Image: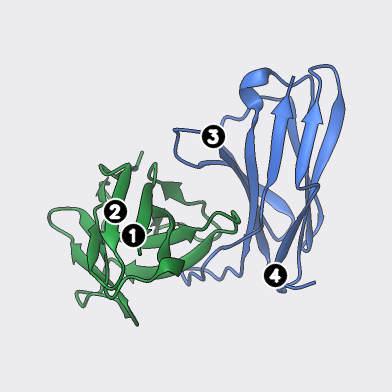
Chain colours: A green, B blue
Amino acid sequence: AQTVTQSQPEMSVQEAETVTLSCTYDTSESDYYLFWYKQPPSRQMILVIRQEAYKQQNATENRFSVNFQKAAKSFSLKISDSQLGDAAMYFCAYRSGSGGGADGLTFGKGTHLIIQP
Amino acid sequence: ETGVTQTPRHLVMGMTNKKSLKCEQHLGHNAMYWYKQSAKKPLELMFVYSLEERVENNSVPSRFSPECPNSSHLFLHLHTLQPEDSALYLCASSQEFRRVYNEQFFGPGTRLTVL
């Protein structure tokens, strides 16, 4: 079974600065997807960024980028120019790519990100 | 309404009650999911439905009973729950094709408290 580990229960960053959230995972599969989801206090979980394991290039979405190290099974999220609206719980998630249909996500415990004004 | 909606948003029930959680997706998706989010624990996948058929049941106790009458609606029927079942229950949906993955869209959740 796959596992996802987020070793930072809480992180704090000054507004406009850069912060990196760490995530490691354990799998024996070679085909899979990795995700970062954000859950603001309103509780609606939304996708921040995703990475296909077969792609070597790191995914980027505006101020959000990942550092995907497949050999090390590491998938960190970098948030540049942090904004107050970035404050939330951030979850790293894994999904197998070998299934033929719908598959659920395996989540880490989450990192609570605090933005200091 | 747009996206994924869940009702009720909050539910308090006794251990002998029977209640149901409802999820509705307005995105034209063909797969739906139930997750349980407890304090201090990762989100746990409970059930997966694809094209209205259950494709995964993640060793969930039988006091939780899912139902998917059509591709837009998903229910979670609850009976004789335990206090440790208190959690946030999240519904999600996605559009699935063989070996092509699209993101899962989540609802706001139902906060369940079992007394």
Q: Dot 1, how many residues are within 10 Å of its Cα: few (below 14), some (14-19), or many (20+)?
A: some
Identify the residue under disc 3: B38
Q: Position of residue A56 (x, y in %)?
A: 19, 74
Q: Which mark is residue B31?
A: none
Apparent side of residue A104 relative to residue B80 in the rendered image (left or right): left
Q: Please state, as top left, top right, bottom left or bottom right, where the C terminus of chain A lies in the image.
A: bottom left
Between discs 4 and 3, the one toward the N terminus: 4
Q: Dot 4, how many residues are within 10 Å of its Cα: few (below 14), some (14-19), or many (20+)?
A: some
Of tags 4 and 2, the one toward the viewer is: 2
- Subunit ID for the residue under disc 2: A
Apparent side of residue B51 relative to residue B87 in the rendered image (left or right): right
A106 and B57: which is toward the camera: A106
Three-letter residue code for mark 4? Gly
Identify the residue under disc 2: A12
- Subunit ID for the residue under disc 3: B
- Subunit ID for the residue under disc 4: B
Q: Regarding mark 1 in the picture, which secondary structure is present there?
A: strand
Q: Position of residue B81 (x, y in %)?
A: 73, 21
Q: Regarding mark 2 in the picture, which secondary structure is present there?
A: strand
The answer to whether the residue labelled 2 contacts the one labelled 1, judged by CB atoms less than 8 Å apart, is yes
Between discs 2 and 1, the one toward the N terminus: 2
* Residue B62 image-quadrant placement: top right
Q: Which mark is residue A116?
A: 1
The answer to whether the residue labelled 4 contacts the one labelled 2, judged by CB atoms less than 8 Å apart, is no
Q: CA distance from mark 1 to mark 4?
A: 31 Å
